[in-house]
Image (cartoon, coloured by chain):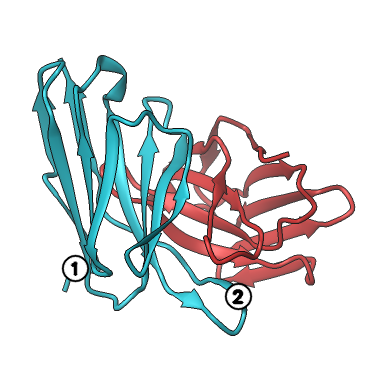
Amino acid sequence: DTAVSQTPKYLVTQMGNDKSIKCEQNLGHDTMYWYKQDSKKFLKIMFSYNNKELIINETVPNRFSPKSPDKAHLNLHINSLELGDSAVYFCASSQASRLAGTQETQYFGPGTRLLVL
Amino acid sequence: QQQVKQSPQSLIVQKGGISIINCAYENTAFDYFPWYQQFPGKGPALLIAIRPDVSEKKEGRFTISFNKSAKQFSLHIMDSQPGDSATYFCAARRSSNTGKLIFGQGTTLQVKP
């Protein structure tokens, strides 16, 4: 009955490799997010999709490419991995409130710990 | 304008004591202020949230105090317990369809038995 799940949980890879992280939510939400948490625990939003449409695209290197095949899934593909990409990546989801014109509570996944060697 | 500043960076409190974490923001368009709790190896989870039309919100041992004129808000944990030991993040957001949250830097709380 996991609400927001991510795979893999751990990812260790070499510099220059390409890797993907997958996220799925079973909450019926229509909005999904990717956050990066650095070694100092600072959380920063990277991307957000609403009904498969990109609505937030922060200043992120274009080596990072999100893909949302449907509103329950949001994947993150990273090309040419660099040492500085080492971090914990969190997926989150929420439901848009049409009445309020905003988003409801964001629910976070357990994170994917990426280590680039 | 987009920053949320959080302090202290770390906090040690004895069991039964009060833990207080403070946040300040600049953007007056922010209208939703949640606090998230994160245990080691887990994702952040919503603890409590407030909107600027009230000055205080209490849920169990957790209280948010909000000072709109000072653009500050704080989390108070009463009767702190060792199980409260975690990292706490304040955040802020303005009403929009994106739901973009701006997080503070986080406070690592240790409650000693």
Q: Residue at x 86, y 47 (%)?
A: B70
Q: Chain of mark 2?
A: A
Q: Can you say whether B68 is above or below B106 in the image?
A: below
The earlier-in-sequence mark between 2 and 1 is: 1
Three-letter code, disc 2: Gly
User: Do marks 2 and 1 share a subunit?
Assistant: yes
Q: Which residue is mark 2?
A: A101
Left or right: where A107 falls relative to B25: left
Counting from the top left corner in percent of width and height, residue B64 is at 67, 60
Three-letter code, disc 1: Thr
Q: Residue at x 40, y 48 (%)?
A: A47
Q: Which residue is mark 1?
A: A2
Counting from the top left corner in percent of width and height, residue A92 is at 35, 57
Q: Can you say whether A91 is above or below A88 in the image?
A: below
Q: Is residue B55 visible?
A: yes
Secondary element type, mark 1: loop
How far apart are labels 2 and 1 at the CA level?
28 Å
Counting from the top left corner in percent of width and height, residue A94 is at 41, 68
Image quadrant for the N terminus of chain B? top right
Image quadrant for the C terminus of chain B? top left
Determine the colour of chain B: red
Left or right: where A105 falls relative to A63: right
The quadrant holding residue B97 is bottom right
Counting from the top left corner in percent of width and height, residue A60 is at 41, 33
Query: Which chain did the renderer colour cyan?
Result: A
Left or right: where A102 falls relative to A80: right
Secondary element type, mark 2: loop
Q: Chain of mark 1?
A: A
